[in-house]
Amino acid sequence: MSKAWSIAEWMKRGGLLLAASSIVLTGCQGVLLTYKGAKVRDAYLIALTDGTQKSASYQSPELTIEYQWERSGNELQLSGLAKFTPRIRNNFNMIPSFLLSVFFTDAQGRILEDRGIPTPGSDDPNNQIRFSEKLLLPPGTANMAFSYSGQACGGGGADGSEDMYFW
């Protein structure tokens, strides 16, 4: 059997599709989902004035965040406690994934950068999640806004499902 025949047979059996897929996927490696440039609603913006230390709380249907922050020039010390609301605690018994992040925005609320906040893992929705991080602010930062996503499992969602993704 000739080498040309082997290549033709390989292409006929899906090799061409595999090769084309590899080329396309390799070309897409640098493409990442980003919120940069998107606008955050004014109601979610937290003004970051220099030299100010502040404590406040953020409430959503799934999460309450009690936090403290202090801005000093281009640095922000951010710490707090995230707690799942009864909507999660009373209906699910496991949180296999949870990501907390903060958007830094300009004065018009346009996202300059999205920064993940390291949190200790917790499968139990009754556990409180502590965080503390010193963050370098991108130039032009005037505000921040919290963002989160996660998955709750092992219970009964409002629609009768076993799992719920939240953000």
Image: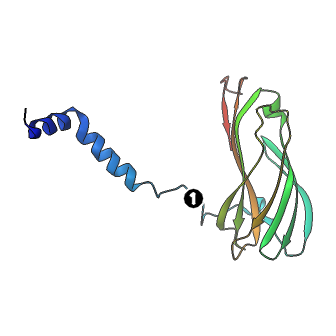
Residue at figure coordinates x 60%, y 64% from the top left: 36
Q: Point out the image quarter for the C terminus.
A: top right
Report the number of discs: 1
Q: Position of residue 164 (x, y in %)?
A: 67, 32
Q: Position of residue 43 (x, y in %)?
A: 77, 60
Location of residue 33 with respect to 165 vertically, above or below: below
Dot 1, how many residues are within 10 Å of its Cα: few (below 14), some (14-19), or many (20+)?
few
Q: Nearer the viewer, residue 30 or 44?
A: 30
* Residue type, numbered disc 1: Thr
Report which residue position mark 1 lands on. Answer: 34
Q: How is the image coloured?
A: rainbow
Location of residue 60 with respect to 127 vertically, above or below: below
Q: Position of residue 65 (x, y in %)?
A: 84, 49
Element type where label 1 sits in the image: loop
Q: Quadrant of residue 155?
A: top right
Q: Position of 80 compared to 98: left or right?
A: right
Q: Point out the image quarter for the N terminus.
A: top left
Location of residue 14 with respect to 44 vertically, above or below: above
Q: Nearer the viewer, residue 35 or 135?
A: 135
Residue at figure coordinates x 76%, y 59% from the top left: 44
Residue at figure coordinates x 77%, y 40% from the top left: 62
Q: Quadrant of residue 63?
A: top right
Residue at figure coordinates x 9%, y 36% from the top left: 5
Q: Quadrant of residue 123?
A: top right
Location of residue 47 with respect to 9 vertically, above or below: below
Q: Position of residue 136 (x, y in %)?
A: 74, 68
